[in-house]
């Protein structure tokens, strides 16, 4: 339904339109727009009235780019001062290329230089910009880093007179090493120019905590960030959750035969899902999200084989970070062109705002763990007026018998899918964490970068530049001194000190800083190897706390962590025979928030059968609820199966992982999972005293967990950081979840045990 526009709203739109530069108004008319959207009207006022920073938060295809750039181009239209006017920062080269095409015609008619500045962009355009700095540069954080380190004089010429810094996809920078990196770089860019001159404009599709986003965008004055949210009332969504049963005698691994087919006697669920995807999606443009690169390749290969078998053109193609840039760009261009039906089977690579046009539907194999990701993915569909968004979620559950794990009996995937849809309707989005695991490595990286940029710098000067308000605000002078001592150790030799106290790069530091790998702070290959004896089992990413004595699931069985080799990134494990393991558990998958687990518990305790569930999914939900009640989980937090003791935390991934580490520290082998922790071979009488000890522990008694936890080196340069500093930073980052442990242990202990 198209809402009517009141006379007062029309006057506001007309007034905002009239404030735009003549060339901008002409361009808008040529696009055939009926007028400015509400978010664009408010952005015109915010940008042109100044002097506040601006944060524009709206769904995909809401017109955020135009909301920012139409008034920005108006503001800089008559500028004659040398130097860049606008620095636009994006997390993706592909998004820069899209925006270059999107803004190119308008900038050309306004005679405002526009250049792409990343590793794959033409050098000639950069050279012209360096010779005569002006206009707009579209750049990645890594290219800002390279500019500051390799060409500090040119960087000063370009960046000292900026009017605006525009940060696209702000939500992608609120956590993780790239967010730390960019936040630090923005502070260093500000330090090159006149204090208070450059305004920041953030664009984001998904923000769970606006205050956190404002503080990231302008740490020194978050209260001066003017928020412009999307005024929409929500999306029109067509939803279906489809359930698939995995037979006990089928190979449920993601690498099983893609052509097992739904006609086999015991079809594996993924083959049946592939059949449904082929029938439902063929002939249109769609996105299918898998939970891993391996699953993406499995699905794409199965869909391609079905096309070949039926002798029809293949419309299904994989898209993930391990593919070459050329293959990814070919698929993106095909989606955007829309002349050929195309379905991309992808990881999270197509979540961000690369312009691929509007797809007909989005499918997800496996229940969502992140509401932020789910909302971002849904923004790809239903973008045209009157066209609903279409979402299909495919859940797999195992056929049950007397040997099945109670975790499989609870039908977690189905329950999590229903809980995620409830939170989607409630517009919940996870807030970013208060601190980041890459904090120490980001500080190391930026310290070396500043030394290289300045050709040497004093410690107090570096500290003042980096550790003011912002991402490094928690770093004390003592922390920084400890880091510098660690970097100067003979075995590290990244820095050295001149007689006058100036810090210089050491020989190893020179090699590190001037390698091409230095400019990117993130490390996509940061995985840990599992080794038993002398045999390698494979690799896993680590996103949660883990320690000696923890149990992990891998390759269909349970393993005990015997040793944690920080330097080599190796977990030495041995087989463990305890208990029945859940078939589809993903310990190291995307973390789940406390709110999602709380909602899952509410789903278990309710009796509704949502209409968006197919018949099999409804059966799964009913079975999960029946198991929940049979196990007494509405009143108990512990279930003893005779061999294993299951502790139900009903908390997110961080809390479950921390509880498992503390239990291991106190002598119990513990395995964290989606709903809590499992203690193989342990009974209530043995676990009770340990839980009581945690419940009654003073904060100082649990502080020792930072000395016990392992696998601390998860970020790119963590191997160069003193271990004591890594442990201290880990403790600070996890102090809230550690402080939660006594009350969580008390909740579990005080509930009645169900046998």
Image (cartoon, rainbow, N blue to C red):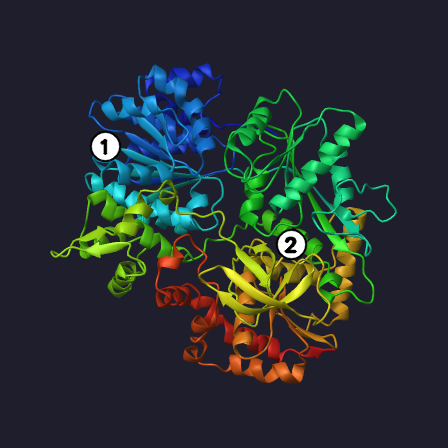
Q: Which residue is mark 2?
A: 419
Q: Quadrant of the C terminus?
A: bottom right
Instruction: Give the Cα distance between marks 1 and 2.
Output: 52 Å
Q: Which residue is mark 1?
A: 154
- In the rendered view, tell whether residue 738 sits above or below residue 504: below
The residue sitting at 35% across, 15% down in the picture is 109
Q: Secondary structure at mark 2?
A: helix
Image position, residue 326 (x, y; %):
53, 29
The residue sitting at 39% across, 15% down in the picture is 26
Is residue 352 left or right of 488 when viewed as pictured? right
Is residue 244 left or right of 157 when viewed as pictured? right
- In the rendered view, tell whether residue 29 sits above or below residue 134: above
Given residues 139 and 169, the one toward you in this image is: 139
Q: Nearer the viewer, mark 1 or mark 2?
A: 1
Residues under numbered marks 1 and 2 in contact, where contact means CB atoms less than 8 Å apart:
no
Residue found farthest to the front? 534
- In the rendered view, tell whether residue 214 sits above or below residue 708: above
Given residues 40 and 283, the one toward you in this image is: 283
- Regarding residue 572, the answer to whether it shows in the image is yes
- In the rendered view, tell whether residue 698 sits above or below residue 557: below
- Regarding residue 51, the answer to whether it shows in the image is no
Given residues 567 and 707, the one toward you in this image is: 567
Image position, residue 312 (x, y; %):
76, 24
Is residue 91 left or right of 78 when viewed as pictured? right
Residue found farthest to the right? 265
Of pointers 1 and 2, the one earlier in the residue sequence: 1
Q: Secondary structure at mark 1?
A: helix
């Amino acid at each position: 339904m198209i809402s009517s526009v009141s006379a007062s709203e029309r006057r506001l739109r007309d007034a905002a339109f009239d404030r735009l530069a003549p060339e901008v108004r002409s361009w808008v008319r040529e696009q055939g727009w009926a007028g400015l959207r509400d978010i664009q009207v408010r952005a015109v006022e915010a940008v042109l009235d100044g002097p506040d920073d601006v944060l524009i938060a709206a769904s995909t295809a809401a017109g955020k780019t135009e909301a920012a750039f139409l008034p920005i181009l108006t503001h800089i239209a008559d500028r004659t001062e040398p130097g860049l006017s606008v620095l636009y920062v994006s997390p993706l080269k592909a998004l820069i290329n899209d925006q270059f095409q999107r803004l190119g015609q308008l900038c050309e008619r306004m005679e405002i230089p526009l250049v792409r500045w990343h590793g794959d962009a033409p050098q000639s355009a950069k050279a012209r910009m360096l010779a005569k700095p002006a206009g707009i540069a579209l750049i990645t954080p890594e290219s800002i880093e390279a500019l500051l380190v390799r060409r500090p004089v040119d960087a000063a010429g370009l960046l000292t007179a900026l009017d605006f810094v525009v940060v696209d996809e702000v939500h992608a920078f609120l956590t993780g090493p790239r967010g730390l990196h960019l936040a630090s770089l923005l502070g260093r860019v500000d330090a090159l120019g006149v204090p208070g001159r450059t305004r920041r404009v953030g664009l984001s599709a998904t923000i769970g905590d606006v205050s956190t986003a404002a503080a990231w965008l302008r740490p020194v004055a978050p209260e001066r960030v003017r928020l412009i949210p999307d005024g929409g009332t929500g999306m029109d969504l067509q939803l279906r959750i489809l359930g698939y049963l995995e037979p006990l005698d089928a190979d449920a691994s993601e690498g099983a035969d893609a052509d097992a087919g739904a006609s086999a006697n015991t079809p594996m669920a993924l083959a049946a899902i592939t059949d449904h995807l082929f029938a439902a999606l063929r002939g249109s443009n769609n996105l299918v999200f898998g939970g891993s690169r391996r699953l993406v390749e499995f699905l794409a290969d199965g869909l391609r084989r079905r096309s070949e078998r039926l002798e029809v053109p293949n419309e299904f193609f994989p898209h993930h970070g391990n593919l070459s840039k050329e293959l990814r760009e070919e698929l993106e261009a095909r989606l955007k062109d829309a002349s050929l039906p195309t379905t991309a089977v992808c990881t999270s690579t197509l979540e961000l705002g690369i312009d691929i046009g509007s797809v007909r539907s989005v499918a997800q194999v496996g229940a969502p763990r992140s509401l932020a990701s789910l909302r971002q993915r849904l923004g790809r569909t239903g973008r045209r007026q009157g066209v609903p968004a279409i979402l299909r979620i495919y859940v797999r559950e195992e056929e049950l018998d007397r040997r099945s794990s109670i975790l499989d009996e609870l039908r977690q995937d189905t329950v999590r899918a229903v809980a995620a849809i409830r939170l989607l309707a409630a517009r919940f989005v996870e807030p970013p964490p208060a601190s980041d695991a890459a904090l120490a490595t980001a500080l190391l990286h930026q310290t070396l970068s500043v030394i290289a940029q300045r050709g040497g710098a004093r410690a107090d000067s570096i500290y003042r530049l980096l550790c003011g308000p912002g991402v490094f605000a928690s770093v004390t002078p003592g922390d920084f001194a400890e880091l510098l001592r660690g970097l100067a150790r003979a075995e590290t030799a990244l820095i050295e000190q001149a007689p006058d106290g100036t810090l210089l790069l050491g020989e190893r530091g020179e090699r590190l800083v001037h390698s091409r790998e230095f400019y990117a702070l993130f490390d996509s290959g940061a995985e840990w190897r599992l080794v038993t004896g002398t045999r390698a089992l494979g690799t896993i990413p680590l996103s949660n706390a883990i320690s000696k004595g923890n149990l992990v699931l891998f390759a269909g069985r349970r393993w005990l962590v015997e040793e944690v080799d920080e330097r080599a990134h190796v977990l030495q494990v041995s087989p463990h025979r305890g208990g029945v393991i859940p078939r589809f558990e993903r310990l190291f998958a995307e973390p789940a928030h406390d709110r999602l687990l709380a909602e899952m518990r509410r789903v278990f305790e309710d009796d509704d059968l949502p209409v968006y569930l197919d018949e099999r999914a409804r059966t799964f939900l009913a079975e999960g609820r029946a198991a929940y009640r049979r196990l007494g989980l509405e009143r108990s937090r512990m279930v003893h199966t005779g061999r294993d003791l299951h502790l139900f935390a009903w908390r997110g991934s961080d809390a479950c992982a921390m509880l498992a580490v503390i239990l291991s520290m106190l002598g119990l082998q513990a395995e964290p999972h989606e709903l809590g922790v499992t203690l193989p071979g342990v009974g209530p009488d043995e676990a009770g005293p340990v839980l009581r000890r945690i419940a009654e522990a003073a904060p100082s008694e649990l502080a020792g967990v930072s000395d016990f936890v392992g696998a601390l080196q998860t970020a790119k340069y963590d191997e160069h950081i003193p271990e004591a500093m890594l442990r201290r930073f880990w403790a600070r980052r996890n102090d809230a979840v550690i402080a939660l442990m006594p009350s969580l242990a008390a909740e579990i202990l005080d509930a009645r045990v169900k046998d």
